[in-house]
Image (cartoon, rainbow, N blue to C red):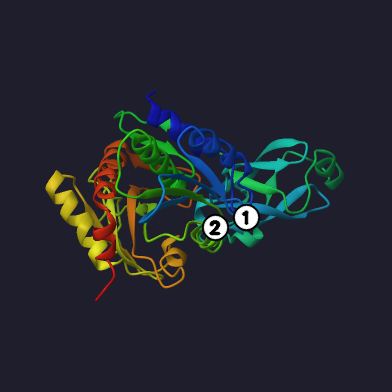
Amino acid sequence: MDTTQQLLKELTEALGVSGYEKGVRAIVRRHLEPLGEIERDRIGSLICHLGEGRPRVMVAGHMDEVGFMVKHITDEGFLRFQPLGGWWDQVLLGQQVIVQTRKGDLRGVIGAKPPHIVPPDERKKLVEKEKMYIDLGATSKAEVEEAGVRIGDPIVPACDFHVLANGKSYLGKAFDDRVGVALMIDLLRHFADAPHPNALYGAATVMEEVGTRGAKTSAEVIDPDVAIILEVDICGDMPDTKPEESRVKLGAGPSLLMMDASMIPNLALRDLLIETAEELGIPLQFSSMPRGGTDGSRIHLHRAGVPSVVIGVPSRYIHSHASIIHRDDYDNALRLLIAVIERLDADTVAGLTPE
């Protein structure tokens, strides 16, 4: 396992749903501390910067993952849960989870009736998450409370990191957006020993999945002149996915987000990325997302505005217990990032402001 695989394994297997990022934050801090000066906001985001002065280039990836929290314990010992982030009900039943308690982590499963006792007409109906529960194997509320469970405890999807059969595809949870955090760390590793014409700030933000909250506070700390947001992107190369839903394919290169519901990228910065990719022969895909947003939604509106763009690593099955990325997409995203950072000098950044 090489250093990038090991980094992705550490980050994705860490537990850190929105608002409860302590575990993953400790890992991120350990990787960033040897690279530069560490700063933080007051809600949990970490910031590492290299160099002083201007322009200030902010590169951001969010460290939180989608998950749940305990909202009720039944008399029989089952847990009702509140989603943290967006979930499609159909991907939940039968999946394993980890409940983080003050006494330690507990393994459980989102309960599902066996088909033997489900009437034929009921089998065709989608079970809504409000009717689901988590089973810890307990037989009473007292037993669950004795194990340390309290209302508000975070619940994390359970999935280990795996390298798949082709050696280049990786399976794991929380690639949204631990892959962006990993790219940010690898980028700072590169520039810790290499010249760059700017002050480079890497931000691992919190609570993106519940309203891009750490993006706002991190931008307040950094006060960036330009920003690149690192994310996953939604693959459209699975069966029964329509081209108009997504043309992004696994292994075909990083993507450039042309718009989402909260941000249209800075056009000059967008063109710089496209031209840089063309010059270096880096494959680049293009996408749009009419619903949803990224940390860029808050960062690009900081103060008088920040020229911003989103680079994505294609991923299958985001916002589920297990998703898949391709190593070539990661490596090409890193190559593109390094090349663009090298070009973001003061004159180039000044030229990004629309006339």
Question: Is 243 or 114 nearer to us in this picture?
Answer: 243
Residue in the picture at 38% in, 37% down: 186
Q: What element carries label 1?
A: loop
Residue pointed to by mark 2: 214
Q: Mark 1 points at which residue?
A: 43
Q: Which residue lies furthest to the right in this view?
A: 142
- The part of the image, by quadrant, that contains residue 264 is bottom left
Viewer can see residue 184: yes
Sequence-first disc among 2 and 1 = 1
Disc 2 + disc 1, Cβ < 8 Å: yes
Q: Position of residue 16 (x, y in %)?
A: 59, 45
Q: How crowded is mark 2: few (under 14 residues within 10 Å), some or many (20 or more)?
A: many
In this view, 204 is above or below 269: above
- Vertical side of 163 occupied by 293: above or below: below
Q: Position of residue 210 (x, y in %)?
A: 56, 61
Q: Name the quadrant of the C terminus.
A: bottom left
Residue under the image location 64 percent in, 55 percent down:
132
Which residue lies most toward the top here? Answer: 1
Is residue 243 among what the camera can see?
no
- Tag 1: amino acid: Ile
